[in-house]
Amino acid sequence: MAANQKIVFALVCLFLACDLVLGQQQAANSSDSDSDVAESRTFGHHFLRRISFALVPGAFVVGVITTLLAALTVVSIKGLGVGVILLVLAIGQMLSRALPVQAAAAYAAAPVPVQAPVPVVYSHSHTQQPVWLEKEW
């Protein structure tokens, strides 16, 4: 039973010590909170310095994002242009196959006289012979 009393006494002493420490911390925090109210961390003395330090990396990030979006836009417009050109060519090909051409029918109805082929002469009379020049020194 004496051992139980020693354990209870030790726990009570520990509880009182913890209460004393917590009471001192609350007193210290209440005095610090008055200074926090007078000058906050966000809008305090060094607010402009913090903003100026954050402004340069923020502007850099915005510039990088803008550049990447511009490059993406250019690549997309280029792809769109190629797609439109291919679409126009495909539509033209479909129309040329589907619609009858009036000029082709009229051209096929009128026979065109075939000209006789030009005779080819295989002689060396028309070719120029090399000229040999001799230098007199």
Image (cartoon, grey):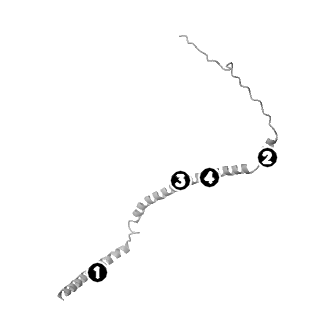
Identify residue type, mark 2: Gln
Q: Disc 3 marks which residue?
A: 71
Q: Nearer the viewer, residue 82 or 91?
A: 91
Calculate the distance from the C-alpha at mark 1 to the C-alpha at mark 3. 62 Å
Q: Splitting the image into 4 quarters, where does residue 55 fall? A: bottom left
- Viewer-nearest of labels 4 and 1? 4
- Viewer-nearest of labels 1 and 2? 2
Q: Nearer the viewer, residue 49 or 119?
A: 119
Identify residue type, mark 3: Ala
Calculate the distance from the C-alpha at mark 2 to the C-alpha at mark 3. 48 Å
Q: Which secondary structure, mark 1?
A: helix
Q: Disc 4 marks which residue?
A: 83
Identify residue type, mark 1: Gly
Q: Disc 2 marks which residue?
A: 102
Calculate the distance from the C-alpha at mark 4 to the C-alpha at mark 3. 18 Å
Q: Nearer the viewer, residue 21 or 92?
A: 92
Q: Horizontal and vertical percent for residue 32?
A: 33, 75
Q: Splitting the image into 4 quarters, where does residue 22 fall? A: bottom left
Please, is residue 9 above or below residue 69 in the view? below
Q: Earlier in the sequence, mark 4 or mark 1?
A: 1
Q: Earlier in the sequence, mark 2 or mark 3?
A: 3
Q: Earlier in the sequence, mark 1 or mark 3?
A: 1
Calculate the distance from the C-alpha at mark 4 to the C-alpha at mark 1. 75 Å
